[in-house]
Image (tube, rainbow, N blue to C red):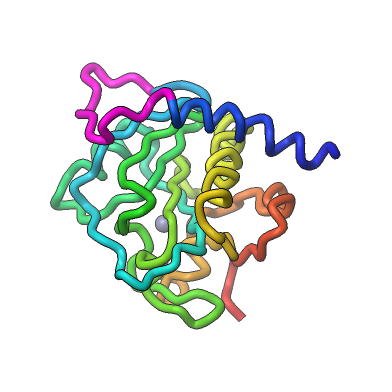
Amino acid sequence: MMKDNRIMIPAIAFATLLQGQISDGKSPMPSPWKDPGYMKLVWIQSPNFGPRPKDAVVDTIVIHSTVIPTLKATTEAFQRESSQVSAHYSIGKDGSIVQNVSTFDRAWHAGVSKDARGKENLNHFSVGIELVNLNDGKDPYPKAQMDALKAIIVVLKRRFSIVQIVSHEYIAQPYGRKSDPTNFPWDEYKQFGLPLYYGKPK
Ligand SMILES: [Zn+2]
């Protein structure tokens, strides 16, 4: 089955990376900065996170665009306590992955939000993934970046009972507060067999 192979190959690669590369989860910002490289992950812990509510069931993936042009600058922003923002993962255009917050903790990426079920405050029960992209509608999402995102989705589907993948645009309240990720190739994500919510909520 062609469809399965396409997602399983990066998943295996990614699972190997997860075992091999995560140390204490609290690496400092590498100096000088170096992007981890295609399908490689470094964990650079953000101070901007907290516990999930005790009864939270993680079942949603939120896709974002950074607007920030590089993985380095995105990571720096999540390192600054004053920014009060973070995501669980950020993915560079070359498929480099930086993890900033454990998926078992609550990252600060969604803001005031509501999903199609009417559930509010998506930070409680979602995993936030940032894609390095200007979000101007022209900046592309390269294949390498999509490979890494698909691999992360496969891993998250194994770890949690994921029921939906949503855009930040769709869940941000009030509607229009956010537009990311603009021009994202949603059709490629139908293969996961999950409801995809993006664009304007009905
Ligand atoms: Zn966003």
Vertical comparison of 65 with 99: above or below? below
Q: Position of residue 101 (x, y in %)?
A: 31, 46
Where does residue 194 sit, x and y in percent of width and height?
67, 61
Q: Residue furthest left?
A: 82
Characterize the magenta stretch by its predominant secondary structure. loop
Q: Going by the image, does 78 lie left or right of 174?
A: left
Residue occupying image coordinates x 40% and y 78%:
120
Q: Residue at x 52, y 26 (%)?
A: 16
| Quarter of the figure with residue 34 | top left
Across and down, in percent, residue 179 comes to 48, 61
Q: Is residue 89 left or right of residue 191?
A: left
Residue in the image at 50% along x and 49% along y: 136
Q: Nearer the viewer, residue 5 or 30?
A: 5
Give the quadrant of residue 106. Answer: bottom left
Q: Residue furthest right?
A: 1
Q: Residue at x 41, y 41 (%)?
A: 90
- In the picture shown, does residue 80 fall above or below 116? above
Q: Please identify the quadrant where the N terminus is shown.
A: top right
